[in-house]
C-alpha cells in the first residue's frame, strides 16, 4: 500500500486574515466590481464578464441597464447601498437567450398508484458586462489592443 495522502486525519485550521478572505471573495487589485440584483437573484459582476441571468425581455445585441446595484467596490473603496447605491448602474449587452439543462420532476405517493413525471428547462438570458458606473469611482477603461508599428522603409528601399 502506497503512502497516505497528505493531511489525512489531521484537523485543518483557517490561516487567513479577514482582508485575505475579502480579497479572495471579491478579487484583488483595483478592478471595479458590483453586486446587482435581477430576477430575484444577486450576482457579483466585473467588467468583461459573461453571465447567465433569469430570462429578460430584450433582443439579442440590445443594451440592458441593471440599476438595482446593491454594492460597488474597487480595492478597499466599497459603497454599500441602503438598499441600493444611488446613481450606480451596470451596463450590459444581451448575447441571446437559451434554456438550461432539463430537470426531471417526479411526484410519487406510495400505495395509491400516483406517479407524475414532468420535465422543466429554465429560460435564461446571457449578458456581457460592458461597464460599471458608480458615483465617486472612475469608470474602468477597457484594455487596449496592442498593435505593432511597421518599420518604415528608408527612401532608397533598403
Image (cartoon, rainbow, N blue to C red):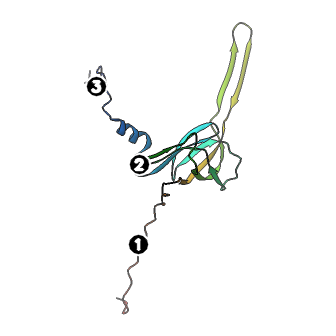
Q: How many marks?
A: 3
Foreground: disc 2 or disc 3: 2
- Marking on residue 20: none
Name which residue lies at 38% across and 92% down: 155
Q: CA distance from mark 3 to mark 1?
A: 51 Å
Name which residue lies at 41% across and 72% down: 148
Q: CA distance from mark 1 to mark 2?
A: 32 Å
Nearer-N-terminus badge (3/1): 3
SS category of the residue bearing label 2: loop
SS category of the residue bearing label 1: loop
* The C terminus sits in image quarter: bottom left
Marks 2 and 3 in Cβ contact (< 8 Å): no
* The N terminus sits in image quarter: top left
Asked whether, in this view, residue 115 is left or right of residue 76, the answer is: right
Nearer-N-terminus badge (2/3): 3
Q: According to the image, label 2 marks what residue?
A: 75
Asked whether, in this view, residue 45 is left or right of residue 97, the answer is: left
Amino acid at each position: 500500500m502506497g503512502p497516505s495522502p497528505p493531511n489525512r486525519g489531521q484537523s485543518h485550521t483557517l490561516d487567513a486574515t479577514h482582508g485575505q478572505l475579502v480579497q479572495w471573495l471579491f478579487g484583488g487589485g483595483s478592478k471595479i466590481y458590483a453586486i446587482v440584483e435581477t430576477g430575484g437573484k444577486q450576482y457579483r459582476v466585473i467588467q468583461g464578464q459573461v453571465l447567465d441571468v433569469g430570462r429578460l425581455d430584450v433582443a439579442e445585441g440590445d443594451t440592458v441597464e441593471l440599476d438595482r446595484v446593491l454594492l460597488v467596490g474597487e480595492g478597499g473603496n466599497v459603497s454599500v447601498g441602503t438598499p441600493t447605491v444611488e446613481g450606480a448602474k451596470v451596463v450590459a449587452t444581451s448575447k441571446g437567450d437559451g434554456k438550461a439543462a432539463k430537470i426531471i420532476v417526479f411526484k410519487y405517493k406510495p400505495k395509491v398508484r400516483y406517479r407524475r413525471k414532468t420535465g422543466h428547462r429554465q429560460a435564461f438570458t446571457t449578458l456581457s458586462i460592458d461597464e460599471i458606473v458608480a458615483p465617486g469611482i472612475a469608470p474602468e477603461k477597457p484594455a487596449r489592443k496592442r498593435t505593432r508599428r511597421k518599420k518604415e522603409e528608408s527612401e532608397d528601399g533598403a
